[in-house]
Image (cartoon, rainbow, N blue to C red):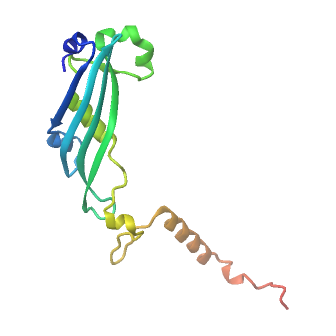
Amino acid sequence: MKLSDIRKNPEGLPFDKQLALKDALIARESSILDLQNVTAKGIVSYDDGLYLLHYHLSYELTLPSSRSMTPVTLQEHYDVSEVFIAAQDVATKKEMVDENLVLILEDDVIDLSESVLDNILLNIPLKVLTEEEEKTEAMPEGDSWTVLTEAQYQQLREEEKQVNNPFASLSGLFDDSE
């Protein structure tokens, strides 16, 4: 969207776009398996030297499960609001730039695809589980290995400390039971 077109429309420019960004997204994050049905619907407007981009983003993102690497498709949707300033206007809003409240536009356009890609990447969850994995606490394991939660690991370390304590065999030696 050209900045000159945005400034010419005081009520803003509405948009409703289907975007094909799978290849670009996978190029930036190789763990992503698939991206489908990317839709951005919103408005971009100009106000007092600032370009305001607000849209509702929805998409289907397929990622490997954090436990089993099984593909999991997530239905995502949320609102995105971004504020831009043209590079030549940075001096007029220096305090906003210094506080990272605005994004600086180097070109004479706002690239909706870049905004969508950035927001998808920022919202990738760290923990992705299949429905079955969410229902159970069972972790993957093999012949000589097991995945543990942090709590299970701490409990195992405490048990090992007690077993490996050289004075453990002396406990109860001086009980007052006699």
Q: How many marks?
A: 0
**Whole-percent x, y for residue 6 in the image:** 23, 15
Between residue 104 and residue 62, name the one nearer to us: 62
| Residue most extreme to the front | 11
Specify whether residue 31 is in view. Answer: no
Specify whether residue 2 is in view. Answer: yes
Instruction: Name the quadrant containing residue 89.
Output: top left
Instruction: Name the quadrant containing residue 78.
Output: top left
User: 104 left or right of 168?
Assistant: left
User: 94 left or right of 70?
Assistant: right
Residue at the location (29% across, 35% down)?
56
Instruction: Name the quadrant containing residue 90.
Output: top left
Between residue 44 and residue 152, name the one nearer to us: 44
Residue at the location (19% across, 47% down)?
35
**Whole-percent x, y for residue 82 in the image:** 34, 26
**Whole-percent x, y for residue 5 in the image:** 19, 14
Considering the image in quadrants, where does the C terminus appear?
bottom right
Give above or below for 44 relative to 35.
Answer: above
Give above or below for 83 relative to 8.
Answer: below
Residue at the location (23% across, 31% down)?
114
Give above or below for 146 relative to 13.
Answer: below
User: 149 left or right of 114?
Assistant: right
Residue at the location (29% across, 65% down)?
68
Considering the image in quadrants, where does the N terminus appear?
top left
**Whole-percent x, y for residue 91 in the image:** 38, 8
